[in-house]
């Protein structure tokens, strides 16, 4: 039971040796005019250990590329906290309580078209 309590409290992603807090990145992403909702999770990455991946819901009628999202973050947050991968989704997965299901978002496969170049 103690392991579950400790595991459920993990809200910081590791980028090499630095910590990245999802709330910081999500607040910057949600301030973008074309983004209606976002969620940030850590995914395994060979170069960085654990890289930041953003799942983004676009506002109706908006078109944005992963590079546009990364450039938006570039002005506001540190380089190691910027998303390395951006996935555009129709809605963010939620548990039955209404909380964001970060575990399922982290398990989604990372594809080359999600990479920010």
Image (cartoon, rainbow, N blue to C red):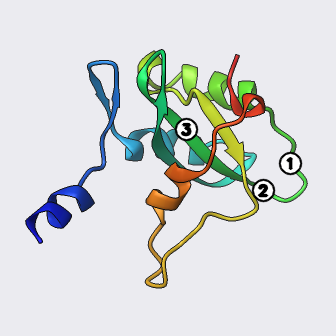
Q: In the shown orientation, is residue 17 left or right of residue 33?
A: left
Q: Position of residue 70 (x, y in %)?
A: 63, 26
Count of all numbered marks drawn on residues in the image: 3
Q: Residue at x 73, y 55 (%)?
A: 89
Asked if residue 78 can be seen in this view, the reply is no
Residue 55 in view in this figure: yes
Q: Which residue is mark 2?
A: 59
Foreground of the two, 97 or 104: 104
Residues under numbered marks 1 and 3 in contact, where contact means CB atoms less than 8 Å apart: no
Q: CA distance from mark 1 to mark 2?
A: 6 Å
Q: Residues within 10 Å of mark 1 (few under 14, many from 20)?
A: few
Mark in the foreground, 3 or 2 = 3
Q: Which quadrant, please, contains the N terminus?
A: bottom left
Q: Specify whether 14 is left or right of 72.
A: left
Residue 72: horizontal and vertical position, in percent?
Answer: 64, 28
Separation (CA) of disc 1 from disc 3: 20 Å
Residue that carries the numbered disc 1 in the rendered image: 62
Secondary structure under tag 2 reads loop
């Amino acid at each position: 039971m103690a392991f579950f309590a400790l595991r459920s409290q993990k809200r910081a992603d590791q980028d090499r040796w630095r910590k990245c807090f999802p709330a910081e990145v999500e607040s910057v992403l949600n301030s973008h005019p074309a983004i209606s909702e976002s969620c940030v999770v850590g995914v395994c990455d060979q170069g960085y250990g654990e890289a930041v991946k953003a799942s983004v819901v676009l506002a109706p009628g908006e078109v944005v590329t992963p590079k546009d999202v990364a450039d938006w973050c570039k002005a506001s947050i540190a380089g190691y906290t910027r998303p390395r991968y951006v996935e555009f989704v129709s809605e963010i997965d939620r548990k039955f309580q209404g909380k964001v299901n970060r575990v399922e978002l982290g398990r989604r496969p990372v594809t080359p078209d999600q990479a920010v170049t």
